[in-house]
Amino acid sequence: MLRQASRLLARRPRLAARTRPFSTDLPAADQTADATFTEAWSKVIPNLDPPKTPLSFMQPRPPTPSSIPSKLTVNFVLPYASALATKEVDMVIVPATTGQMGVLPGHVATIAELKPGVLSVHEGNEVTKYFVSSGFVFIHANSFADVIAVEAVPLDQLDANLVQKGLAEFTSKLSSATTDLEKAEAQIGIDVHSALNSALTG
Amino acid sequence: MAALRREGRRFAPLISPRPITAVRSSPIAPTHEDEGPIGVRYISTQVVRNRMKSVKNIQKITKAMKMVAASKLRAVQTKAENSRGLWQPFTALLGDLPSVDVKKSVVVTISSDKGLCGGINSTSVKISKGIHKLNSGPEKETKYVILGEKAKAQLIRDSKKDIELIITELQKNPLNYTQVSVLADEILKNVEFDALRIVFNKFHSVVSFVPTVSTVLSPEIVEREAESGGKLGDLDNYEVEGGETKGEILQNLAEFQFSCVMFNAVLENACSEQGARMSAMDSSSRNAGDMLDRLTLTYNRTRQASITTELIEIISGASALEG
């Protein structure tokens, strides 16, 4: 235990040096946020190293350029994988709650919630379509788009028969539902399955 | 002569002139206590042999535990690395404000259920207590939500009244997003908060785990910080699509952020636990190996000493007979 403690202590300063080899790399903004925290920490708890915060583990985003860039950079993340990570594309169409929203480079900064529907990524001539269950999309002023979805599958992995069966099942559940919670759950099922249906047919 | 001596010793408790004190071996095994030069006592070989057997078993067990931890680590590590992209968009949008001034903060401490994993649970608990101290003051209160048995055992001793929720047996089924989002839902429903601080060990490599704290703010605090400018000042520039009010979307956003950050935190902590267990078991088997070497030397020394004593007796007996 003591052997490990000395090993960890010896490693921690080296690790801190490695994550931030040049302090000029980080924009001044997150230095100050961390600095107030570290200062307050070292006043109250002098013996322990302050814990790290997520900012120190992230690549900083580029600032808003003065002219509209030609490509949109998309991060499409799911809990289990990053489907697209900083991919440069021409356009994405996201299924927002207000309808299908097309995002081009230079789009105004937006936060939108997603409903079940089809997300399509247009890169040159190729279009990749995914069915997303729900999530959020953040469009930043510097032409970065973050799409965070709970589940997403490429359209060719959907089975039309199971979609029909699920739709029928949830419709019958809605009619036999008694409590508000059951009704809400059945309604959600219907929404998702009808969106799946229209994704496969449309 | 020596044979008689040996026979005599088997009934040592009855006929030995010297009282047998501090018999370390079990009363069932016969004690062959040897006496070298006056005052020196050698531990019996039977005792050393028993000890060597148990140390060797311990070495095998800890080596096996290390292999098990290594295989579990491999399984969770890919999941954790894939989930790392999940919290980054939220931090890019909302920034990270660990030093935000709020009235009600809730510290979510993530720890393991099983022990023998080195010092990671103690580190998490120390950091949680530090954050509690940092955020204490007039009109401010900090509560705990505990995930895992080990943190529960440590925090229940002195902070029992500050604990809101305790959740254990998280890793009974393989970790997945649905389970964590249900958990996040429970926490959000039952606990009032202005800021949630999630304390966990981030997995860097098999030997390095960094204690980390992630802050998730409630929608009201996000609005307050956005209006006051500073880090979240450009949040107002973002158009909010859909929903009736901006507040509704921000509420959904905060809840989604919490579940995503929790998912990543739980996976990273699971990785750190397995990695720490690997290194703990590794140093344990190395220690057992060292102990075994030392015991082997003691055993050989004892054995040789008893052989030498027997030879001395035989030879001195023979020379006494010759006259």
Image: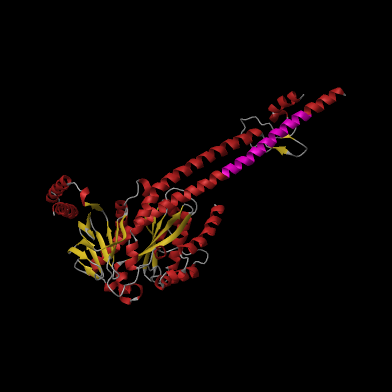
Q: Quadrant of residue A184?
A: bottom left
Residue B281 in view in this figure? yes
Q: Position of residue A189 (x, y in %)?
A: 18, 52
Residue B193 in view in this figure? no
Which residue appears farthest toward the right when viewing the image? Answer: B323
Q: Quadrant of residue B195?
A: bottom left
Give A57 or B187, whichever is nearer the viewer: A57
Give B105 or A102, whichever is nearer the viewer: A102
Q: Position of residue A146 (x, y in %)?
A: 29, 63
What is the magenta range? B287-312
Which residue appears farthest toward the bottom when viewing the image? Answer: B228
Give B64 or A124, whichever is nearer the viewer: A124
Residue at point 76% right, 39% down?
A: B39
Q: Position of residue B124 (x, y in %)?
A: 45, 58
Please identify the dominant SS of the magenta region. Answer: helix
Q: Is residue B248 left or right of residue B167?
A: left
Q: Position of residue B248 (x, y in %)?
A: 23, 66
Residue at point 60% right, 35% down?
A: B50
Q: Is residue B154 left or right of residue A119?
A: right
Residue at point 46% right, 61% down?
A: B127
In the rendered image, the vertical position of residue A144 relative to residue B167, given as above or below: below
In the rendered image, the vertical position of residue B25 relative to residue A186, given as above or below: above
Residue at point 53% right, 64% down?
A: A47
- A39 drawn magenta: no
In the rendered image, the vertical position of residue B218 relative to residue B282, given as above or below: below
Q: Is residue B200 left or right of residue A151?
A: right
